[in-house]
Amino acid sequence: MSLLDILYYPDAQLRRTAARIANVDGDLVKLIDHMFETMYDAPGIGLAATQVNVHRRVMVIDVSEENDSPLTFINPEILLAEGKGEMQEGCLSIPGVYETVKRPAEIKVAAIDREGNPFEIEADGLLAVCIQHEIDHLNGKLFVDYISPLKRNRIRKRLEKWVRDGADPDDIPERP
């Protein structure tokens, strides 16, 4: 397998809406495997195809401490969102940045798994936040869209400079 290149904010490709997937085939399964490898290597707990410049509605998640509970969501749809919660979020496409985001606390999602089987899942806590965060990516939305324009602009400028300087993942930009 190979690692995929992660796009960094404010890359315009992160704003593209991902296309629905008609069928699960070998190429899609291979992409899913590469996405998991990339996510675990980063390290992260979720990765949407949009973040690796593939504009198809697929995302991978593993919120377990041991990286032993991988979840694949193809064409995910939120069926129900209830309650209110806040959690600090970060993103592989926005390294070094963590902000508190308000989202529904409990969700129910329908999707297709890597074998092509439809499923539904109810989630709360970190898993609910992660699912919503990755679905946002598939819709061209980023967690910085939930914060003030002033903070978002500061983050954008800092990351633009970091990318101009070579975007070394081992040298993540410091918060101001």
Image (cartoon, grey):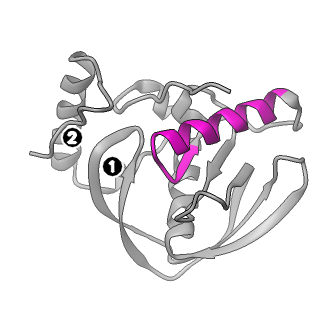
Q: Name which of mark 2 and mark 1 comes first in the sequence.
A: 1
* Residue 165 vertical position relative to residue 175 in the rendered view, above or below: above
> Predominant secondary structure in magenta?
helix
Q: Nearer the viewer, residue 170 or 108?
A: 170
Highlighted range, magenta: 27-47
CA gap, disc 2 and disc 1 = 9 Å
Marks 2/1 in contact by CB < 8 Å: the verdict is: yes
Residue that lies at the very extreme toward the front in this rendered image: 66
Look at the numbered disc 2 and give the secondary structure of its residue: helix
Q: Residue at x 15, y 47 (%)?
A: 150
Q: Nearer the viewer, residue 113 or 136?
A: 113
User: Quadrant of the image for the N terminus?
Assistant: top right
Q: Which residue is mark 2?
A: 155
Q: Is residue 88 magenta?
A: no
Three-letter amino acid code at disc 1?
A: Val
Label 2: how many residues lie within 10 Å, few (<14), some (14-19) or many (20+)?
many
* Residue 108 vertical position relative to residue 149 in the rendered view, above or below: below
* Disc ID at residue 144: 1
Q: Position of residue 159 (x, y in %)?
A: 24, 31
User: Quadrant of the image for the C terminus?
Assistant: top left
* Disc ID at residue 89: none
Q: Position of residue 72 (x, y in %)?
A: 72, 51
